[in-house]
Image (tube, helix red, strand yellow):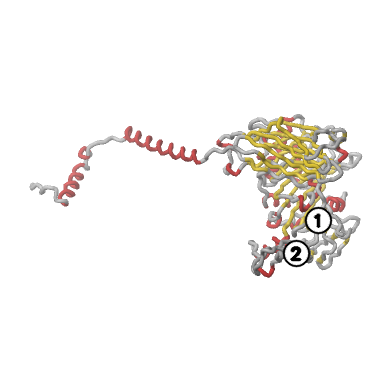
C-alpha cells in the first residue's frame, strides 16, 4: 500500500540550515488527473537594524525601515485549489492568499492615525517594488483583524504593533510580478531551483501562489536576532496540457487510435463512436517537459551542512513508479514514496517519471474543513451571502475563525446573521456554534465592513452561515469601465485553530492556525445605462453648436447688396446676363 502524501512543510522546513544565510528547496508531488504540485521555497537571513546586508535585499529592507514595518506578509494568487481532489493546501495554507493580491503587516506606531499613515507608505512602496496596484489599498479596503492572524516572528513586547490587512481581489497576477520576485533572490533565477521559474509555465498553471514573508527571529533568550525572509512559489501543473503544447502554443486533439474509449457505454454501437476516458494512465514526463528546462546546477550561495551536500529536491510519488536521473546524481530514499536529491554546482539536473498504467494515486488526506461561499437572493436592491462549512472528521470538532472583508457599498445587516447546523449539537457542547463575534460597521466611502466570527462545528456536521445585505447605488464616476461585469468581493479567510487554542470559549494564540480561503465573488450592482449620457452629450453638443452658430451670425455678419461692394457688383451683373443669353432668355447687347 502506498504511503500518505507528504506536505512540503514537513520536509523542506527541516532541510533548511538554521545557521546559513540562504537556502533553497523544491518539493514535487504527483496529484490525481495527471497533475503535479511544485513547491519552491527560498529562505534568506539578514541582520536587524543594519544598513549593510550581505544577501537580504536592500530594496526591501529600506521599505520596511521607512514604514516601520516589523512583520510583512504579501501574497499573489491565481486559480483555485481543488481540495476534494488534492487534499489540504501545501504549507497548511499559510503561503497562499486569496485570489488576486493580499497583504497584511504589523506596523509600529503610536496611535491608529500614525499606523494608517505608515501603512500607506508601505503599500505605495511595495506597489513600485513589485509592479502591482497595491497603492489602491486605501481606507475602504483596509481592515484590522483581531482573531484571524497572529505574529509569527519574535517581537519586542514593549513595542506598539498595529495589524492592518488589505486585499485586491481584482488584481491580475502576471510576469511583471514574477520578475521583481526573482530579483530578490541572490542567484536571480539564473542557477539553482529558481532556474525552473519561467513566466510562461508558471502562469499557465491551474493554480499558482507566490508569497513573501518577512519576520524577525530571535533565540529563546532574546539574543542572536535576525531578519528572515521566506519566498514561496506553489503551482499545480497540468502535465497532459504541457505535453500537448510542446507541438505548438495551441494543443492539438488526439488522433482516433490514441484515444482510450469507454467500453461500458452500450449506446455506442458504431465503430467510429467513442467516449474517451481521460487520465487512465500517468503519463511520462521530465522536468524539461513541464518547466521548459532542467535545473541549472545549484546556487553557490546555498551553503552545505557539515561539509556535506544537502538534499534540495524532493519527490513524493507512488513507490511503483520509476524515476530516472541525470548522469552523476544519486537518489536518497527517505521512505517508500519520498525520494530526495542533492544538487551539484555547474551540473544540470533533470529527472524522468515513467509512464504508469493504470494510474496510481497517492492516498489523499482529508482537509480539516471544506468551505464554499455564494450569493443568494435576486434583484438589484438587496441580496444575501451563504457560506457552507463542513467538518469531515468523524470524531473531532473543528474550531475556526471566519473573516469577511466587505466593501462599503455592500451593506450587511448583523441582525440577519444565522448559523445553522444540519445535525443537533452534542449535549456536552454549546448550543450555538458562534463563540465570539467582532463587527466593525462600514462608513460610506471611508471604510468597509469587517466581520470576524469564532465558530465551532461538531464532528461530521455541516454549518451554514447566512446574512443579508443591501446594495448601494454608486456615483457615475465610481463605476469601472466594465461595470456590467460586477464588482469583485474578496474571499473569506478561515483560520482553523488547533484544539488547544480554545478553552472554555476563550481564544488563544499559542500555535499557528491552518488557513484556507473561499473563492471570490462577483457582486452585480444597480448600473445606469451608460449609453444615455453619451446620447445626451451628443444631442446637447449639436443644439449648442446650432444655437451658437446662428447667434454668432446674427451678431457679426452684415447683409448688403452685391452692387454696394466695390468691384463686385459689375462683374456679377455681367455673369448673370451671360447665363441668361446662353439660355435664350436675355436681350441683345445694347449698342454703344
Pick the residue in front: 523 or 202: 523
In the rendered image, residue 238, in percent from the top left (x then y), is placed at 72, 58
- Pointer 2 with pointer 1, Cβ within 8 A: no
Pick the residue in front: 539 or 557: 539
- The image quadrant that residue 333 belongs to is bottom right
Q: Is residue 160 above or below residue 224?
A: above
Which residue is at a point 77% across and 32% down the rendered structure image? 437
> SS of the residue at dot 1?
strand
Quadrant of the image containing the N terminus: bottom right
> SS of the residue at dot 2?
loop
The answer to whether residue 1 is left or right of residue 93 is: right
Is residue 332 in view?
Answer: yes
**Dot 1 alpha-carbon crowd within 10 angstroms: few under 14, some 14 to 19, many 20 or more:** many
Numbered mark located on residue 236 in the image? none
Which residue is at a point 79% across and 41% down the rendered structure image? 495
Q: What residue is disc 2 on?
A: 283
**Could you tell me how far apart the alpha carbons at marks 2 and 1 are, in whole angstroms?**
19 Å
Q: What residue is disc 1 on?
A: 27
Badge nearest the viewer, 2 or 1:
2
The furthest residue to the left? 591
| Mark nearer the N terminus (2 vs 1) | 1
In the rendered image, residue 23, in percent from the top left (x then y), is placed at 82, 53
Which residue is at a point 71% across and 61% down the rendered structure image? 278
In the rendered image, residue 265, in percent from the top left (x then y), is placed at 70, 63
Q: Is residue 94 above or below residue 142?
A: below
Amino acid at each position: 500500500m502506498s504511503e500518505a502524501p507528504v506536505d512540503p512543510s514537513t520536509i523542506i522546513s527541516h532541510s533548511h540550515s538554521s545557521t546559513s544565510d540562504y537556502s533553497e528547496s523544491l518539493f514535487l508531488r504527483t496529484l490525481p488527473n495527471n497533475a503535479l504540485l511544485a513547491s519552491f521555497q527560498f529562505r534568506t537571513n539578514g541582520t536587524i537594524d543594519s544598513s549593510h546586508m550581505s544577501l537580504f535585499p536592500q530594496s526591501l529592507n529600506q521599505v520596511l525601515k521607512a514604514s516601520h514595518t516589523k512583520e510583512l506578509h504579501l501574497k499573489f494568487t491565481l486559480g483555485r485549489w481543488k481540495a476534494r481532489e488534492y487534499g489540504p493546501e501545501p504549507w497548511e495554507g499559510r503561503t497562499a492568499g486569496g485570489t488576486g493580491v493580499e497583504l497584511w503587516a504589523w506596523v509600529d506606531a503610536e496611535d491608529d492615525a500614525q499606523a494608517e499613515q505608515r501603512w500607506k507608505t508601505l503599500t505605495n512602496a511595495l506597489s513600485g517594488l513589485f509592479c502591482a496596484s497595491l497603492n489602491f489599498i486605501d481606507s475602504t479596503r483596509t481592515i484590522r483583524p483581531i482573531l484571524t492572524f497572529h505574529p509569527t516572528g519574535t517581537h519586542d513586547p514593549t513595542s506598539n504593533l498595529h495589524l492592518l490587512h488589505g486585499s485586491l481581489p481584482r488584481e491580475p497576477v502576471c510576469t511583471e510580478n514574477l520578475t521583481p520576485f526573482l530579483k530578490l533572490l541572490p542567484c536571480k533565477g539564473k542557477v539553482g531551483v529558481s532556474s525552473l521559474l519561467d513566466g510562461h509555465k508558471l502562469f499557465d498553471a491551474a493554480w499558482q501562489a507566490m508569497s513573501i514573508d518577512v519576520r524577525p527571529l530571535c533565540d529563546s533568550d532574546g539574543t542572536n536576532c535576525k531578519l528572515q525572509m521566506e519566498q514561496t512559489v506553489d503551482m499545480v501543473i497540468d502535465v497532459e496540457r504541457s505535453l500537448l503544447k510542446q507541438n505548438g502554443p495551441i494543443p492539438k486533439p488526439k488522433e482516433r487510435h490514441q484515444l482510450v474509449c469507454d467500453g461500458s457505454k452500450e449506446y455506442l454501437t458504431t465503430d467510429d463512436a467513442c467516449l474517451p476516458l481521460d487520465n487512465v494512465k500517468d503519463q511520462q514526463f521530465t522536468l524539461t517537459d513541464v518547466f521548459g528546462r532542467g535545473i541549472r546546477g545549484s546556487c553557490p550561495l546555498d551553503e552545505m551542512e557539515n561539509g556535506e551536500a544537502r538534499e534540495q529536491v524532493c519527490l513524493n510519488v507512488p513507490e511503483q513508479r520509476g524515476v530516472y536521473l541525470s548522469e552523476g546524481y544519486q537518489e536518497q530514499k527517505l521512505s517508500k514514496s519520498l525520494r530526495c536529491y542533492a544538487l551539484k554546482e555547474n551540473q544540470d539536473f533533470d529527472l524522468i517519471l515513467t509512464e504508469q498504467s493504470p494510474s496510481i494515486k497517492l492516498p489523499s488526506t482529508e482537509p480539516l474543513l471544506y468551505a464554499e461561499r455564494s450569493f443568494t437572493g435576486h434583484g438589484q436592491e438587496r441580496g444575501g451571502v451563504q457560506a457552507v462549512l463542513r467538518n469531515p472528521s468523524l470524531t473531532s470538532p473543528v474550531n475556526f475563525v471566519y473573516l469577511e472583508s466587505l466593501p462599503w457599498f455592500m451593506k450587511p445587516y448583523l441582525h440577519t446573521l444565522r448559523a445553522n447546523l444540519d445535525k443537533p449539537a452534542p449535549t456536552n457542547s454549546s448550543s450555538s456554534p458562534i463563540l465570539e463575534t467582532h463587527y466593525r460597521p462600514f462608513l460610506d466611502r471611508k471604510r468597509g465592513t469587517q466581520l470576524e466570527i469564532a465558530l465551532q462545528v461538531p464532528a461530521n456536521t455541516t454549518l451554514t452561515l447566512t446574512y443579508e445585505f443591501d446594495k448601494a447605488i454608486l456615483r457615475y464616476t465610481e463605476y469601472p469601465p466594465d461595470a456590467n461585469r460586477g464588482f469583485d468581493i474578496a474571499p473569506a479567510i478561515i483560520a482553523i485553530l488547533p484544539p488547544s487554542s480554545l478553552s472554555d470559549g476563550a481564544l488563544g494564540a499559542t500555535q499557528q492556525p491552518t488557513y484556507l480561503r473561499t473563492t471570490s465573488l462577483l457582486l452585480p450592482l444597480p448600473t445606469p445605462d451608460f449609453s444615455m449620457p453619451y446620447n445626451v452629450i451628443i444631442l446637447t453638443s449639436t443644439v449648442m453648436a446650432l444655437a451658437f452658430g446662428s447667434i454668432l451670425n446674427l451678431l457679426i455678419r452684415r447683409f448688403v447688396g452685391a452692387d454696394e461692394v466695390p468691384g463686385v457688383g459689375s462683374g456679377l451683373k455681367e455673369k448673370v446676363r451671360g447665363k441668361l443669353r446662353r439660355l435664350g432668355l436675355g436681350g441683345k447687347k445694347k449698342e454703344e
